[in-house]
Amino acid sequence: MAYDDLRGFLSTLEKEGQLLRITEEVLPEPDLAAAANAAGRIGEGAPALWFDNVKGFTDARIALNVHGSWANHALALGLPKHTPVKEQVEEFARRWDAFPVAPERREDAPWRENTQEGDDVDLFSVLPLFRLNDGDGGFYLDKAAVVSRDPEDPGHFGKQNVGTYRLQVIGKNRLAIQPVPVHDIALHLRAAEEKGEDLPIAITLGNDPVMAIVAGMPMGYDQSEYEMAGALRGAPAPIATAPLTGFDVPWGSEVVIEGVIESRKRQIEGPFGEFTGHYSGGRRMPVVRIDRVSYRTNPVFESLYLGMPWTECDYLVGPNTCVPLLKQLRAEFPEVQAVNAMYTHGLLAVISTRKRYGGFAKAVAMRAMTTPHGLGYITTVIVVDEDVDPFDLPQVMWAMSSKVNPADDVVVLPNLSVVELAPAAQPAGLTSKMIIDATTPVHPDTRGNFSTPTKDLPEAKDWAARLQRLLSEARG
């Protein structure tokens, strides 16, 4: 089932027992973020959370942890909620092959119901803002889809970026934005600032569940997130025209904010409790001036708690990090079987592959580090054989413990780029990267004693299914 807006998805979550309404009065801080933090600690079937009785807010509707479990992630893709994570990744990869699917332009977008413009813009009157971690430097919009265009090729639909970037509210009509250098919006901003021009943007809040997934997905510079959303939905993504910028924005958004990133203006932004499980400090970041806000009547404010994994952020960017890396690697190395890059948005990746010859695994790992996502994120790659499931960590640990000779199988590459938020980087944005080759040597590599490996018995697969069936029957 394809969802056109957040509200339709929340209804399905409730029907499936995956949305919990909190009816008693809660404090905006710390209760809202603490509840979402706790949801990440109660297991893989955690529900989305709904709050509409928040002290100090007269008219708040707040949704948290919407993607915060494998059950919710499966439902976002229209799959049964009990679909195992490996099957979700495989289905994600299968749908990728349908890309591109052209979007469908619609009129009468629900966010056109209400408008603030110019001096009347006041985010505090539209959104029930609250801090996510107690050390945050302010209020954040952290689950927005931000739309920008290449100033040098504004008519190219594929170069219109839809990305997730953290946004700190620094005034009723002003935001600070962190455009990570490896991301498309940073390229757009640099091109605009080289011309001495502001960069128009549209910021959309409360989007359909697939749009939230693709906005955090490492795609090619000229690949359209809307066309990828259509592939993942199995139906064209509905879009509408933003009235001030003319940009293409999701039709079903709760709120659409339009304005510009002001050329060459910077202001302190942060600290912020990040996806790395650490605070990032305050830095001088570009400033957004908001010129228009369009919003649905009684808008739902969707926010995302992130901090020490696992949180909603990790479910949201898990498969959508694994699959692009898998597809990009397979284009050059068809031997690659699977990629698990779910850990801290792919700062670590586990890759299973067949080998053509000795040293092949290390070549695959180096290529992973130079993909669009790998350039800014992957710091450690573990490569395992094709019969090792990279999503089964006991198997990965077995491969590392039995096949790795540190003198020959661990490679450290100094002074490579990484996202500035990586806590171990020194200085920020620069790090050493590591390859761990946990594969079985093949000719002409003759090291070790791997001539007689054990294998699962041929009947084990059937027995596994049989045991699962018997256990299910026994448990009723």
Image (cartoon, rainbow, N blue to C red):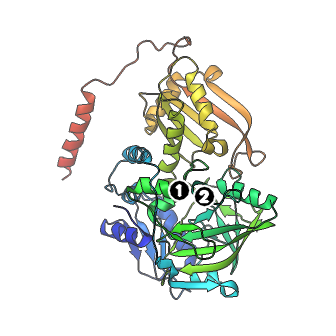
Residue toward you, 460 or 41: 460
Kindly report the distance in space between the C-alpha atoms of the residues bearing marks 1 and 2.
Answer: 7 Å
**Image vertical order of residue 473 relative to residue 146, above or below:** above
Residue on which disc 2 sits: 161
| Disc 1 residue type (three-letter) | Glu
Query: Hey, which quadrant is residue 305 in on the image?
Result: bottom right
Is residue 204 visible to us here? yes
Is residue 134 visible to us here? no
Residue on which disc 1 sits: 225
Quadrant containing the N terminus in the rendered view: bottom left
Mark 1, secondary structure of its residue: helix
Q: Is residue 20 left or right of residue 301?
A: left
Mark 2, secondary structure of its residue: strand
Task: Pinpoint residue 122: horizontal percent, then vertical percent.
Answer: 65, 84
Task: Pinpoint residue 379: horizontal percent, then vertical percent.
Answer: 64, 40
Task: Pinpoint residue 78: horizontal percent, then vertical percent.
Answer: 35, 58
- Residue at 70% from the left image edge and 60% from the top image edge: 151
Q: Is residue 104 left or right of residue 463?
A: right
| Label 2: how many Cα within 10 Å (few below 14, some 14–19, many 20+) | many
| Disc 2 residue type (three-letter) | Asn
Q: Is residue 104 left or right of residue 472?
A: right
**Image vertical order of residue 217 relative to residue 338, above or below:** below
Whether residues under marks 1 and 2 lie with C-beta atoms below 8 angstroms apart, the answer is yes
- Residue at 44% from the left image edge and 40% from the top image edge: 391
